[in-house]
Amino acid sequence: MKDKELYKKLFTVVAPIAFQYFMSSLVTASDAFMLGFLNQDSLSASSLAGQIAFVCGLFIFAFVSGGSVLAAQYWGKKDRKVVEEVLALTMRYSFLVGAVFTLAALFIPCQLMRFFTNDSGLVQLGAVYLRTVAFSYVLAGFSQAYFGIMKICDLAALSSLIGSLAVVLNILLNACLIFGLGPFPEMGIAGAALATVAARVFECVFILFVIAGKKCPPLRVRKVFRLNNRLLHRDYVKYTVPLLLNQLGWGGGVTMYSVIMGHLGSDATAANSIASIVRSMIASLCWGISSGVGIILGGMLGRNEIAEAKKAGGKFVRLSLVIGVSSGLVILAVTPLILKVIDLNDQAQYYLKYMMFMASYYIIGNSLNSTIIGGMFPAGGDTRFGMICDIVTLWCVVVPMGMIAAFVLKLPVLAVAFILTLDEFVKIPAVYRHYMKYKWLKNITR
């Protein structure tokens, strides 16, 4: 495949996925922006409560990614029957995880919030948010599983359309329910949560219409509860468990960042929340590249195009660096605008200015690593290396250093924030060395 054709195919897949990631991050941004008009505590509480959705998403993402590892190669092999079975397995586990988090948010919201902060005001506000948003988790288990399979089956644009319309609805309802516009009641932080639930309901209803229209692989409900293909189930577990451990290890480490910053005061929490939101929005293209690379290389390997996949991999690595540097420059460019628009006190503004600078170089390493660890290695069934790499980097190096800096040495907030941006760069040598061995280039279909 020529370079022009390869990049055209990549961006055909990447564009809708990246746009969907961007639109999803807009929801978090709109929550922060609108709640920031109410008061800084509402902003901080919603950000910390949002970590529950983040952790739930880690589980769901792992199960969806495990399904994508198999589905991409079987779709490249044109085995639709197995793809339908993979969808059933993915739905089984992602829906179950969503249900567990829904129950936790309904019945123990204060306990969940106390893990992130010891500020009683933030705990109470966050508990209100969690009780209201609870049902969005189980709905996400359904919608995200289907979005994952739609991207594999050449329906990335349709999944992006559904997700983007849901985001638009979420943002509009955010404004109406937070501030009480028109006939809507003024609900504050609970309004932001209710808008999220409504958007998830919209997604699920739209997906049901798509299924009824036979535009994508059908969901065999019977197979969700009982699938007799033991070999496929074994393969699914084999590739999903490392991804799940990887997500929990990585996500748990990132969550610990919020825990550490949350115990350094409301100013540090608010600044860190805004910087993380902006970084996530700009990183949408990086994550889209990662997903698109996994889908394209997975299809190649499923068709036994090993040499072509190896050449394409090198091009994707170089592209990820270009995207990372460009994203960092964009963050630097929008920093003055963010500082003007977001209403924070002077201390929080000071923190935010330098946290944005840290985000600008952090995203370069994130772009490279997400493409290789999140896209290329899993495309060939190599989900184990990323698990080991992320867990060791975060839990043996960065998180302990951050906790020592914050709670033992009592270093300034920005020094702690700097330490917490080192994880992507610590693991680059090991990642590149593993990539150059090319053991990840495998056809894993039966």
Image (tube, rainbow, N blue to C red):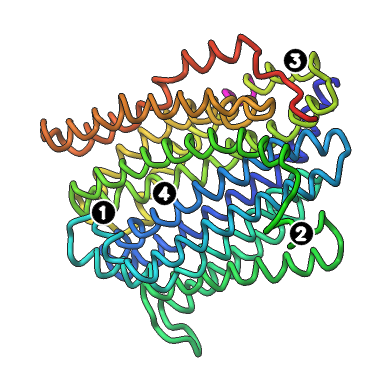
Say which label, 4 or 2, has the lower sequence index.
2
Say which label, 1 or 4, has the lower sequence index.
1
What secondary structure is marked by label 4?
helix
Reading the image, the residue beneath label 2 is 219
Q: Quadrant of residue 318?
A: top right
Report x, y in % for residue 351: 25, 43
Task: Assess whether residue 321 is covered by the magenta stretch.
Answer: yes
Say which label, 1 or 2, has the lower sequence index.
1
Mark 4–mark 2 distance (CA, rounded to whole Å): 45 Å
Q: Which mark is residue 337?
A: 4
Report x, y in % for residue 280: 48, 44
Mark 4–mark 3 distance (CA, rounded to whole Å): 41 Å
Reading the image, the residue beneath label 3 is 311
Q: Is residue 210 above or below residue 59?
A: below
Mark 1–mark 4 distance (CA, rounded to whole Å): 33 Å
From the image, give the main secondary structure of the stretch colored magenta. Answer: helix
Which three-letter amino acid code belongs to the residue tagged 4?
Leu
Q: Which mark is residue 115?
A: 1
Q: Which residues are magenta?
A: 318-323
